Amino acid sequence: MKTKLIKVHPEDNVAVALTDLNAGERIAFEGDAIEVVSHSRAKHKIALTALAAGDRIQMYGVLVGKASEDIPKGGLLTTENVEHQSGKVSGKTETTVWNAPDVSKWKDRTFMGYPREDGQVGTANVWLFFPLVFCENRNIELLKDVFEKELSYYRTNSQRLLLRSLISGNSIETPVAEEEEEKGIFDNVEVKFITHQGGCGGIRQDSVTLSRLLAGYVNNPNVAGATVLSLGCQNLQIDIFKEAVKKINPDLKKPLLIYEQQQMGTVEEMLNVIIRESFEAIKEADKIKRVPAPLSKLKVGLECGGSDGFSGISANPALGYASDLLTALGGSPILSEFPELCGVEQELVNRCVEQEDADKFLSLMKAYEKSAVDAGSGFDMNPSPGNIKDGLITDAMKSAGAAKKGGTSPVAAVLDYTEYVTKPGLNLLCTPGNDVESTTGLAGSGANIIVFTTGLGTPTGNPVTPVVKVSSNSELARKMPDIIDVDTGAVIRGERTIEEMGEEILDYIVRVASGEEKTKAMQLNQNDFIPWKRGVSL
């Protein structure tokens, strides 16, 4: 370890502990001597100067809190002596000049993707089954059982063997799954299934929003076609769904099979028709082959979850550099999780190319925060217990690090939830900070890859879009190797630069997009789908 502290921005008055620090330990730092006041765990923050109650706390060059009591030089920042506070913004104050990274080594790079008639390119080729209303969830599950057993890869896992041994009375400690595996009959298409709790009840607006989200999934370049189940009497009527599809893509060429149970007789009769017709459509989808495509066809969702005190100085800025590379190549990175942009609004507003987008971003942020406050909450309650335990003690502190995923490029567009990405360059998408609600929204807005940084670990995946997991620290990568794809811990150790790690992430994205790598979430068959109802969700 070359140093025990790191200051992220020259104007910061706190530093991050890169290793556990002991009380009384003296650290030479930037020509000064810092005496550690109390035991401080790695990832937490140390005051570089004495702070009086009410003083501003600066990190990443922005306001991330204020001292609620006196904090001595070398003192540990905690939830007891720090309160959330963020900078106020009313509009654009300057136009940011962007120095794009050198992409000469990437400009001729391609990925092997699935071409769609509307010009989009998929990184996967999925036939998707989903219901318009929760009443059809059981029928979706029945279809899933039939299709997955007959079409997909599967194997007897160690957990089933363990239970089998317990039932037989021949219990063994760690049963090993046999490497028996059946290969599905198709080479180029996967079959995936979505269920949800929406489509009826609640308020009508929820069903309309759900219709737009599902239409986005149909239009996602990773989807070859879909089988859709309707009951018939629900709020989310077939006509509402079709109108949502038409609004996103008026000339959709993908096959869309829609069935209404109340018009089809018995469940068995309906399922038999669905299986026959869907199987024929899936056979056609299997004929679509991968072809070379420019990296400009990549729409990459930028997500974080289970963040820690290292996320904002390793994984997130490394992903931010990969995002800048993609923008310079004509691609579309998508930064989501609006509660985790609290405190960095001024920077993002100044990066908006169009004034209209700057105004839209501020309007969405203010409306979101007001809805949280009206419900008795607020953005300040966003950090989870895991975040706080690992050094992210205010929302502004968490947000300043989370926003690093978006790099430094201009903001080309600002989108509300379920709006579809159409412009190249960095897009801001209004979603909650909740991991699955956000990744669900990213795929619904067209992301054909999602990169998910984490410091604590999370198994989140998506049914149509590959999710790449990037760890902020090597301890996590060693502890949970079954969920981590890329480890940026070398940045913390001073062995790799942010730029080097960013290029490694982009290289991995291209390999996943080409089908050369299966992400850990894909290997775990992690297919999470939770629509956001636009209520308070941080």
Image (cartoon, rainbow, N blue to C red):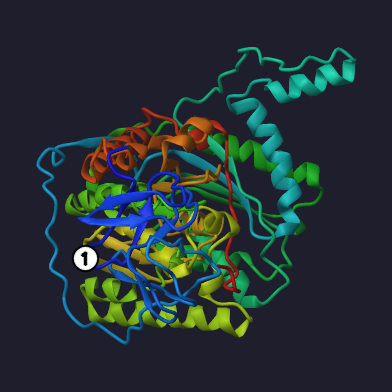
Q: What is the count of numbered marks?
A: 1
Residue 220 visible, this angle: no
Q: From this viewpoint, which residue is outermost toward the front? A: 24
The residue under the point 22% across, 39% down is: 500
Query: Dot 1: within a 10 Å radius of its alpha carbon, few (fewer than 14), some, or many (20 or more) residues?
Result: many
The residue under the point 48% across, 82% down is: 367
Closest to the observer, 184 or 434: 434
Residue on which the image places disc 1: 410
The residue under the point 72% across, 63% down is: 232
Q: In this view, does 258 lie to the left or right of 476?
A: right
Q: In this view, does 233 lie to the left or right of 101?
A: right
Residue 396 visible, this angle: yes
Q: Is residue 51 left or right of residue 318?
A: right
Vertical comparison of 37 with 200: above or below: above
Quadrant in which the C terminus appears? bottom right
Q: Is residue 211 left or right of residue 331?
A: right
Closest to the observer, 191 or 391: 391
Give percent across and percent down for residue 526.
57, 40
The residue under the point 49% across, 56% down is: 38
Give percent across and percent down for residue 427.
32, 63
Q: Report the amino acid beneath label 1.
A: Pro
Closest to the observer, 382 or 72: 72
The answer to which image quadrant residue 445 occupies is: bottom left
Quadrant in which the N terminus appears? top left
Give percent across and percent down for residue 149.
67, 27
